[in-house]
Amino acid sequence: MTDEEIRHQFDFWIGDWACAWEGGSGTNRVEKVLDGKVIIENFDGTPSMPLRGMSISTYSAEKGAWAQTWVDTDGSYLDFIGGWKNDHMLLEREGIVNGKPVKQRMVWFNITPDAFDWHWDRSNDGGATWATLWAIRYTRRK
């Protein structure tokens, strides 16, 4: 697969989305900028929760992977790396929670033109097992 083809792997995410999770809902606007080589996400969890955040994603030909940086109203800064695996997009990172090392990941799956599922997962055992901490169903806003 060429770098140009890989740059289109996240195209399913581009658009205006209604987001629903257990106990809440929000919106997410995702668009391509800078000659289509950068993806900007603007998430808004209000009024269900006060969290708002944004990410910037791009394909790094040098790393042969997608890289994403996330920042939010909690002051979080998270950096991810990954790519397309089988039928889903997977971005991962090493983190610290309560002073202990963890693995964290985001998974986009069940992807159709107008909907997909997104999970925020964490592993406390080096990736042997994973727990989903936040599951969001995305539906394209018309």
Image: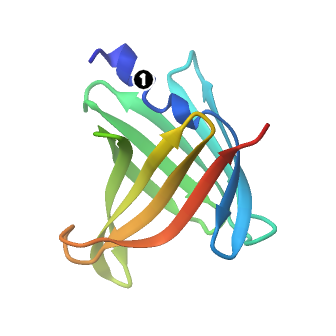
Quadrant showing the N terminus:
top left
Q: Is residue 75 above or below residue 42?
A: below
Q: Is residue 8 above or below residue 118?
A: above
Counting from the top left corner in percent of width and height, residue 54 is at 62, 49
Q: Nearer the viewer, residue 59 or 16?
A: 16
At 64% from the left and 31% from the top, the residue drawn is: 31
Which residue is situated farthest in the bottom direction here?
98
Quadrant of residue 101 within the rendered picture: bottom left
Residue for badge 1: 7
Quadrant showing the C terminus:
top right
Quadrant of residue 7 within the rendered picture: top left
Please state which amino acid type lies under the numbered disc 1.
Arg
> Dot 1: what SS?
loop
Counting from the top left corner in percent of width and height, residue 40 is at 60, 37
Q: Nearer the viewer, residue 12 or 3?
A: 12
At 33% from the left and 18% from the top, the residue drawn is: 3
Counting from the top left corner in percent of width and height, residue 108 is at 45, 48
Q: Is residue 39 above or below residue 21?
A: above
Counting from the top left corner in percent of width and height, residue 68 is at 44, 44
